[in-house]
Amino acid sequence: MLMMKQQAMVAPVARRPLAVLAVAKPNANKRTGVVPKVAAVAEPSLDMYKRNPDGTIDLSAAPPFTLQDLRNAIPAHCWEKNTMKSFGYLAVDVAVVFGLAAAAYTVNQPWLWPLYWVAQGTMFWALFVVGHDCGHQSFSNNKTLNDFVGNITHSSILVPYHGWRISHRTHHANHGHVENDESWHPVPKSIYDKMEPLSRVGRLSLPWSMFAFPFYLWSRSPGKTGSHYDPSSDLFVPAEKPLVITSNTFMIGMIGILAAATVALGPLAMLNLYVLPYWLFVLWLDVVTYLHHHGASDPKEKMPWYRGEEWSYLRGGLTCLDRDYGIFNKIHHDIGTHVVHHLFPQIPHYSICEATEAIKPVMGPYYREPTKSPGPIPTHLIEPLVRSFRDDHYVADSGDVVFYQRDPNFGK
């Protein structure tokens, strides 16, 4: 069973000048159809990669390229934010949300409601991604506008925009770090041993973990304290307290709207129109965000987690995984294309695929090509999700490069 690698195994490789590879007509990505508009990219030679004893490339070791190498490979226009384009995507999402609700409420047939729950839950997830981009300030160049749109979109699906935005910023700044990461980070063995059985089930088993998001907002993850709703939480610095209160005010307003709608339409109608789609949205969020950081497509590969001097922003970001979500890729604004986003969250979602194609030659084997969806529905993602929850329970308390371990007695 993989536990940890010795310090010598992951020592940074010596830097060499990167070879420049001319690319006149790069091939379009089969999944996205995007052709990156870049004239030249830097590509490391194969002898620059750290090797495992069996000769395979050690992807937990420091890469032979830098964050700046990746940045330089991305076309300049990918960084440009187009406010009107962002509002166009938002307008489509809002129109679909209201259209679905109006159609389902008008038809009001038992056979239609389950289809509506899935469709509307997916659209709630799309709205979340728009607010997510506002939190990264990639919606527009105007921070006030970004925060206003973020508060509206997130409160509409009962997410405290600023509270979540700030903790998500912590996640990005510490991605791949065992203790300092904020989202879906591993549980060290000492904390795992102290977890109550119910907490283990809720955090480390299917399907319960896929409905964890609202509870995370209230009380965070095992081993961490505080709440996204508490302005005095250690999640926030004192200067952020008014922002948290602002988002809480938006949330209270949304709860008032939902209460008024319940009085007007009746509890059963609101259960169908909002409550059940909300839980489908939570399912989407937890599945997608978990698969961003767990369950490599190759069953033999374990994703590394770092501590101490072995962690860096670049190495942590390289542990992210891109996924193909079939027909949902564009519906949820390419949030499955996640590696570039984690390294450069300022890039708008509509440029993320082109930016990804541009950095692939630089990343080489450090880019894990996503398995293509077998059809419109990404059923292929069930296997890595189930496998990860079966095998990934905790990491060692010590060691600067560690891998998930399995508890053979889990659930017994």
Image (cartoon, rainbow, N blue to C red):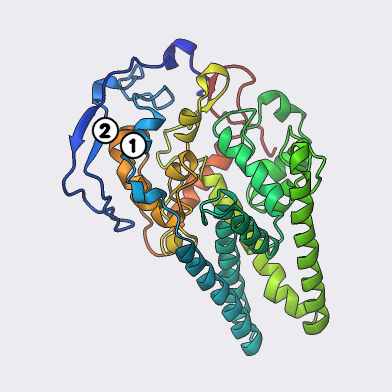
- Looking at the image, residue 99 lies above or below residue 372: below
Q: Which residue is most to the bottom?
A: 106
Q: Is residue 254 visible?
A: yes
- Give x and y (percent) for residue 57: 33, 25
Q: Does residue 249 appear to the left or right of 391 in the view shown?
A: right
- Residue receiving disc 2: 42
Front-lying residue, 81 or 307: 81
Front-lying residue, 275 or 263: 263
- Residue receiving disc 1: 72
- Give x and y (percent) for residue 61: 42, 22
What is the three-letter code of the residue carrying label 1? Answer: Asn
- Give x and y (percent) for residue 339: 44, 42
Quarter that holds the C terminus: top right
Q: CA distance from mark 1 to mark 2?
A: 9 Å
Q: Does residue 335 appear to the left or right of 267 in the view shown?
A: left
Label 1: element kind: helix
Q: Is residue 267 visible?
A: no
Residue depicted at 63% across the width and 51% down the height: 210
Label 2: element kind: strand
Residue depicted at 41% across the width and 22% down the height: 62
Cβ atoms under marks 1 and 2 closer than 8 Å: yes
What is the three-letter code of the residue carrying label 2? Answer: Ala
Front-lying residue, 219 or 344: 344
